[in-house]
Image: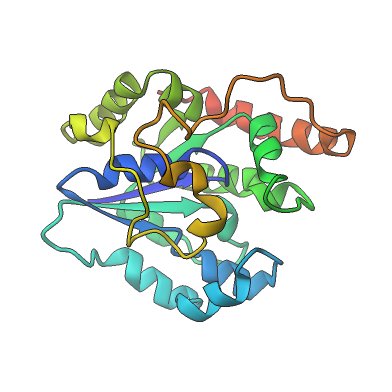
Amino acid sequence: MNIFMWSGPRNVSTALMRSFENRKDTFVIDEPFYAYYLNKTQKNHPLRDEIIKKYPNNEEDVIKIIMNNPQNNKLIYYQKHMTHHILDKTPIDWISKGINCFLLRDPKEVINSYIKKNNINDSSDIGFPSQLKIFEKANKFSKKTIVINSKDLIKDPENTLKKLCDKLNIQFNNDMLNWPKGKRETDGIWSKVWYENVINSTGFSNKTNNKKEKIILPKKYEKLYEECLEIYNLINKYKI
């Protein structure tokens, strides 16, 4: 069973990957298109050259990996995908071979978190336009498209995960609520830049979420926020 979990960056997506990885019946893969994306766009991301060198960066090779569960004894093949890694010419018909889930976060929170790690040139850098395109494409293939809001995961992880598992037709497992602190072999090498909070976490309720604070974005990001908010609202109305 392929689960394609689509989100932009800074969406609590790695915490959700941890949650599924803690199931005994699940194997996870972390952002398999990242090297491909960096190679094609030449975006100046931290560890860019190392990522391109270490991971497959041809779309055909990546698709072979995501279509073949490397651990056949595991029922679930959970794939954490970044929507912005899928470019206009990237083949995407393979999404019909699994259940497509979309993890959302308020764009104000996304922008506020992302600019602490990297620069934002436009909305494509944080994945909102591509998330809408993939969402629309997935809905053509299946009526089982699932939308989750990261706020719900943080506020009420047990109930949200139960809803998600019900939609996926899999049994909820209490192991999904907590996980051991530390790195994983399945983490991409970019974890040293992006995953500090998750590496030090043991569940959704601690450092995987931001402390409640009023976010005031710099003025130069106001138009970006409005653009992303419109897309966010379009998809969020379908959340479980």
Q: Position of residue 199 (x, y in %)?
A: 42, 47
163 over 66 or under it: above or below: above
The residue at 58%/24% (across/down) is 211
Eyeballing the image, is 35 above or below 163? below
Q: Residue 232: x, y in percent?
A: 62, 31
Instruction: Report x, y in % for residue 209.
Output: 51, 30
Give 239 or 9, whichever is nearer the viewer: 9
Q: Residue at x 31, y 19 (%)?
A: 159
Q: State the image coordinates of residue 63 (x, y, percent, origin top left).
A: 39, 69
Colour mode? rainbow
Judged left or right of residue 167, residue 221 is right
Q: Given the current orientation, which residue lies at the most extreme bottom position? A: 53
Q: How many numbered discs, if any?
A: 0
| Residue 162 shows up from this direction | yes
7 to 218, vertically: above or below: below
Q: Is residue 139 visible?
A: no
Residue at image coords 47%, 37%: 103
Front in this rendered view, residue 160 or 135: 160
Closer to the camera in the image, 191 or 161: 191
Outermost left residue: 73
Q: Quadrant of residue 106?
A: top right
Q: Quadrant of residue 153?
A: top left
Q: Residue furthest right?
A: 219
